[in-house]
Amino acid sequence: LGVAANLGVLGYFKYLGFFAATFQALAGGGLNVPQVILPLGISFVTVRQIASLVDAHRGEADEYPITDYLLFVTFFPQLIAGPLVHHKEMMPQFARGRGGVGWQRHFPIGLGFLAIGLFKKVVIADNAAFIASPIFQLAAEGARAPSMAEAWAGALAYAMQIYFDFSGYSDMAIGSARLFGIRLPLNFHSPYKAGSIIDFWRRWHITLSRFLRDYLYIPLGGNRLGKPRRYGNLMITMLLGGLWHGAGWTFLAWGGLHGLFLCLNHGWVFLREKRRLRPLPRPLAVLITFLAVTVAWVFFRAESFEAAGRMLRAMTGLDGLTGWPGGSDQVVNDNRALRFIPWLALAWFLPNTQQLLRRYRPAVDLTRFDDLAPDRRRWWHWRPTLPWLAFTLALLYAVGREFDQLSEFIYFQF
């Protein structure tokens, strides 16, 4: 009853319009659906409550004071766009924090995360949007087809936009929680460095992947009931994961495409182990994974299947091997479009924020990644020193120069 009540509230506020529009398209008749305003953070609140209810039913959750539970559900740094925190990670920290959090120790670390996250969002992601948005809008309007060069520039720019947008938000969530002496779970760990789709989903929206695995994929049977059932469970999990991101068929297609990628990836791993084949060279595996993810992002960003189709036709050269248009046909200046290249190099070759601040244990449970395990301290690790203070102030100065417009996180709409 508790799970049904939570899902009912989520279904009404988030999916009623989608189901009504689908019914109207299929049946030809309209439904009188009231205008629904999405409550703040409803997706993440609902998922957290479902996990708590299921764990309580399994006998895996302690009895918590109601005030601690309400704090767990509504703790503001992770309310709007995650991470999807688990009660076992947060409740002990809330209990320890009652005696004071020692803000002098946590404030510099939190400020460092906030500055880096703001820079990623405002300076990189928002500028990438100036490339991606006009090109995707061109595909949506259909006045002319994007050229092959435009389509790839738009898709790659959006790949950079959503990467640094979500990475920046994840840093800011960790930083703002750390101001209160609270460590959130890691939610983002250089997913474009992944050598496979399996590895990508271990690095992208880590806490959502954990929830889908523990509360959907495994209860469906996981990989315990044979390979056909395993692949079916993967597809169901990813389709629902896509639908969770947004009430639209393009999000469902994005989830289904990643489900297909995961099935192919697991099939390849099985074949490689059976035939004792060598794995692909790491750079090639990373490149193939990145291209697959970029193609899937087209459905995630496109306003309709028609717009996604125009983008994909242009990217594959079915509309001709066309370069950058000239003159008045340009929707984005060709020099601006090349700005995604250094951002991609930044995502591929430089350490991420968790690695920079690893000596201060920035998040919960870092041991799952070898490159975050404790090791000797390196010169480039962040420290509360004057040079790093100057670096932080330089980032904030760059943010201030760019922060002159409305800037929303992509994941706020989910």
Image: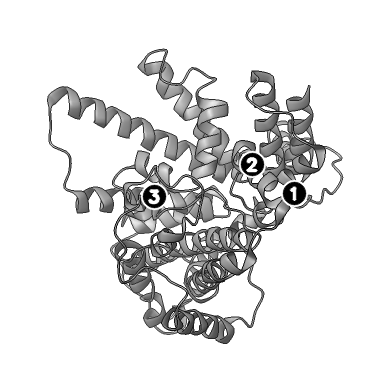
* Vertical side of 335 occupied by 199: above or below: above
Write down the residue under mark 3: 293
Secondary element at image label 1: helix
- Image coordinates of residue 162 in percent, x first then y, are 50, 60
* Vertical side of 369 occupied by 234: above or below: above
Q: CA distance from mark 3 to mark 2?
A: 37 Å
Residue neighbourhood size for the residue with mark 3, other residues' Cα within 10 Å, grouped as few (<14), some (14–19), many (≥20): many
Q: Amino acid at mark 2?
A: Pro
Q: Amino acid at mark 1?
A: Thr
Write down the residue under mark 1: 74
Q: Residue at x 35, y 63 (%)?
A: 351
First of labels 3, 2 by sequence position: 2
Q: Which residue is the extreme one toward the top?
A: 225
Query: Disc 3 vs disc 2: Cβ atoms closer than 8 Å?
Result: no
Q: Quadrant of residue 197?
A: top left
Q: Which mark is residue 92?
A: 2
Q: Nearer the viewer, residue 45 or 156?
A: 45
Q: Quadrant of residue 150?
A: bottom left
Quarter of the image with the N terminus is: top right
Q: Amino acid at mark 3?
A: Val
- Image coordinates of residue 107 in percent, x first then y, are 59, 69
Q: Is residue 42 visible?
A: no
Q: Nearer the viewer, residue 221 or 248?
A: 221
